[in-house]
Image (tube, coloured by chain):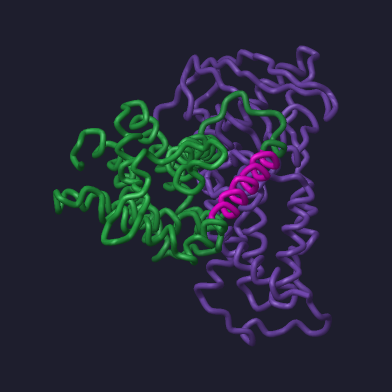
Chain colours: A green, B purple
């Protein structure tokens, strides 16, 4: 759980950094998502990243399978529940990782349908394509216009709300998961554990704020 | 604090034996002194039940000083009741006020089957200890204690881990029913000392195997165990056990 968790945490850093390129439009109003599309293309055609994409799916699947095993074993460990149960320290999100994970998975299915399948398999076997201008010419190279796809998806307030909720679930999931992974690996130290916990909060806030701002910024036309 | 008497309503789990289906039974107790312990309150109730020719409520107890780890009640949704770092025998009735309703349940875990009422079978813990919670000692003259220098910090940490009284509150309070705090304390107290070195690898592997065999749940780092532990055993012991386990698992033959 911890190992796959760490892997997914690392992936989120890459994913968030790359997507944050859309905010380059705030710096240069003529950017129009060029920087983002350029980097997305670079990553999408890089052999290492493409290989890691398989690793990511394996990692995600393992994370889910491990979670399900934990859930079923832990459920069996207490067949008769307490009539009254109160917690001193145990945080609600630490106790609800399965629920939060399920919400994230539901969000991921929608998310992959919006961006990943059209980008990878668009047009094949009836899978919906990126918008009409699938390929855009930037700096003499043809790249997928993922930025245009973002603008299409996030023009609907419903999509923005669903994405915000997905990120909200992710935030609580990470808040527990980040520090928990370290404990699983036996890293618990008087000096460094508070530091790790602080880093976990910092990571969660930065990653999730940036992710949440993406659909909001596009919907409110802060970036164009 | 001023002394006062109170009348209480108790909702207590009653179960004839391990096979029987249990249910809650409600009792009214009157004139309970605020200076009584929680178990003494049960003594008052039981005396009355015996006089009435009824079956008294069975509960585990021994020292009633908070050091033996026998008592085990889930009081109003908390292992050992509302006070922190406390056993239920050391919980006093001044924690409650007149007219309160108190729900009392046994530890709930598949590895701790109910024997009767509030008494659960905690021999699963004994079997875990038997699996590896010991050190080999050669016969012959006792070795001079000073011949084996032990770092002060390690000695303290070992002593702290050894203060676990094995009451099982960690299992009872864990949302997953995991026994990691108990097992890690028992592994740590020996892993930190040179005396524990010969069986260091097999100990952690065997004790964890036995723990899983007993049906305890898995730790997901919620840390509720540490919060309810009457002795304040730290979850840093769990991290140590994880280190020991990884180390032993990768290098043991």
Q: Is residue A69 magenta?
A: yes
Q: Magenta region, mostly helix, strand or loop?
A: helix
Residue at 52% x, 56% y: name it.
A53
Whether residue B210 appears in this view of the structure is yes
Q: Is residue A53 magenta?
A: no
**Image x and y of residue A31, in percent:** 19, 52
Q: Nearer the viewer, residue A61 or B85?
A: A61
Q: Nearer the viewer, residue A129 or A194?
A: A129
Looking at the rendered image, the quarter that the C terminus of chain B falls into is bottom right
Residue at 33% x, 32% y: name it.
A160
**Image x and y of residue A11, in percent:** 45, 56
**Image x and y of residue B100, in percent:** 50, 18
Looking at the rendered image, the quarter that the N terminus of chain B falls into is top left
Residue at 61% x, 18% y: name it.
B10
- Decide: is A143 above or below A91: below
- Decide: is A54 above or below A78: below
**Image x and y of residue B33, in percent:** 53, 24
* Magenta range: A56-74
Q: Nearer the viewer, residue B168 or A89?
A: A89
Residue A37 falls left or right of residue B194? left
- Decide: is A59 above or below A108: below
Residue at 43% x, 57% y: name it.
A44
């Amino acid at each position: 759980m911890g190992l796959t968790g760490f892997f997914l945490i690392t992936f989120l850093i890459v994913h968030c950094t790359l997507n944050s390129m859309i905010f380059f439009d705030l710096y240069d109003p003529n950017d129009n998502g060029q920087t983002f599309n350029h980097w997305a293309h670079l990553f999408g055609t890089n052999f290492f990243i493409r290989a890691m994409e398989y690793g990511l799916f394996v990692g995600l699947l393992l994370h889910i399978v491990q979670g399900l095993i934990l859930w079923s074993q832990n459920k069996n460990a207490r067949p008769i529940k307490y009539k009254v149960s109160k917690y001193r320290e145990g945080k609600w999100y630490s106790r609800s990782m399965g629920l939060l994970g399920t919400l994230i998975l539901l969000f991921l299915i929608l998310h992959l349908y919006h961006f990943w399948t059209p980008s990878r398999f668009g047009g094949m076997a009836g899978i919906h394509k990126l918008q009409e201008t699938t390929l855009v010419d930037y700096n003499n190279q043809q790249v997928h216009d993922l930025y245009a796809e973002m603008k299409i998806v996030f023009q609907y307030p419903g999509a923005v709300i669903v994405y915000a909720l997905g990120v909200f679930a992710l935030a609580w999931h990470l808040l527990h998961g980040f520090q928990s992974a370290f404990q699983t690996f036996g890293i618990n130290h008087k000096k460094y554990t508070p530091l790790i916990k602080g880093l976990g909060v910092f990571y969660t806030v930065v990653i999730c704020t940036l992710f949440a701002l993406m659909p909001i910024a596009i919907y409110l036309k802060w970036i164009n | 604090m001023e002394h006062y008497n109170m009348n209480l309503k108790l909702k207590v789990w009653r179960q004839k034996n391990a096979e029987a289906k249990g249910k809650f039974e409600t009792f009214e107790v009157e004139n309970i002194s605020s200076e009584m312990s929680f178990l003494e309150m049960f003594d008052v109730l039981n005396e009355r039940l015996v006089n009435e020719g009824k079956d008294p409520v069975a509960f585990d107890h021994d020292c009633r000083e908070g050091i033996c780890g026998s008592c085990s009640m889930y009081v109003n949704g908390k292992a050992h009741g509302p006070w922190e770092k406390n056993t239920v025998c050391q919980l006093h009735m001044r924690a409650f006020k007149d007219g309160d309703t108190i729900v009392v349940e046994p530890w709930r875990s598949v590895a701790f089957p109910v024997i009767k009422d509030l008494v659960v079978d905690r021999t699963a813990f004994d079997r875990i200890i038997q699996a590896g919670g010991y050190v080999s000692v050669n016969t012959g003259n006792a070795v001079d204690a000073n011949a084996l220098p032990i770092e002060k910090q390690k000695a303290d940490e070992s002593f702290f881990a050894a203060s676990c009284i094995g009451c099982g509150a960690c299992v009872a309070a864990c949302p997953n029913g995991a026994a990691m705090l108990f097992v890690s304390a028992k592994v740590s107290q020996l892993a930190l000392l040179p005396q524990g070195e010969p069986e260091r690898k097999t100990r952690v592997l065997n004790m964890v195997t036995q723990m899983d065999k007993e049906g305890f749940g898995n730790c997901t780092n919620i840390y509720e165990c540490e919060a309810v532990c009457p002795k304040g055993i730290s979850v840093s012991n769990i991290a140590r056990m994880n280190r020991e386990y990884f180390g032993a698992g990768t290098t043991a033959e």
